Image (tube, grey):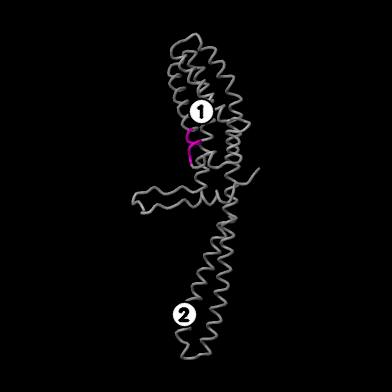
Amino acid sequence: MNQITESKMLHLSHAPTDAPKRAAAAPKQTAGELFSKSINLSGRRRFTSQRLVLYALLASQGREGALATAHDALAIFRDAHAALLDGELSPKLMGGELKEAYFGADKANERIVAFVELAQRTLDALAAHMHSAASLLEELVDAATPLLATLNRLTQLYEDLARQQAASAKKQLTAVMGDIELIAKHARIVSFNAQVVAARAGHSGREFAVVSGELTQITGKLDGLVREAVRSAVA
């Protein structure tokens, strides 16, 4: 499975800021939050596809309220699919495996759109008590199983991509913390050398010693932050 490119990870993790800042601007979602949202939407799409077929069958048997429930399920299914196609993790934006899954050989998007259209025709026929309702319903039932397999694959793909993103983010954070730790190490060496020079300079080096002491405190705080960040990254 191909890894998500680092540039896309940075795009997801660091969204551009608006200038000037809006007082009531909504906070940008993190990459983890976006992937979690996509997994939920994909799962909702999978669940409502089955709910739609079930209540269409019940509507054909005259169950009260079943047709309305089927219409609701179709609306939720359609909205979830649209959100996945047009969101910040859309297949066209992400590219790679996700784009291939939707628009490649598996033709997931084409299958989903065809299912939505078939479901709409079936529900309309049931509502109008048309003779074609029975055959359309049978076709809808037959389409549900292969569609479910497609939706399962898409949900699994979102979960795999989320794990890749989390691993990439952890790796990047650990690398950054390593760089900061190295800088802190060099700063401690500079501080120590400054203290030695200040001591040799005696009274004239007193102000230099104060600056050196401040630098020592800063590097100590930086060390603590690095340790805490690294513990969080590898947790």
Q: Residue 50's spot in the image, x, y percent? A: 54, 25
The label on residue 226 is none
Circle 2 Cα neighbour tier, 10 Å, few/some/many (<14 / 14–19 / ≥20):
some
Q: Residue furthest top?
A: 131
Q: Residue 187's spot in the image, x, y percent? A: 54, 74
**Tag 2: amino acid:** Val
Q: Is residue 23 above or below residue 129?
A: below
- Of the two numbered discs 2 and 1 on the same chain, state the one appearing first in sequence: 1
Q: Residue furthest left?
A: 23
> Which residue: 39% across, 47% down?
26
Q: Which residue is mark 2?
A: 211
Q: Main secondary structure of the magenta part?
A: helix
Mark 2 or 1, closer to the camera: 2
Q: Is residue 178 magenta?
A: no
Q: Residue 226's spot in the image, x, y percent? A: 54, 64
Q: Residue 8's spot in the image, x, y percent? A: 55, 48
Q: Are marks 2 and 1 in contact (CB under 8 Å)?
A: no
**Which region of the structure is painted magenta?**
82-87
Give left or right: position of 124 versus 25: right
- Cα separation, mark 2 vs mark 1, equals 65 Å
Q: Is residue 83 magenta?
A: yes
Q: Quadrant of the image for the N terminus?
A: top right
> Which residue: 51% across, 51% down?
13
> Which residue: 43% across, 12% down?
128
Q: Quadrant of the image for the C terminus?
A: bottom right
Res 146 → quadrant: top right
For label 1, the SS is helix
> Which residue: 48% across, 18% down?
121
For label 2, the SS is helix
Q: Is residue 79 above or below residue 56?
A: below
Q: Which residue is mark 1?
A: 48
Q: Is residue 36 above or below residue 13?
A: above
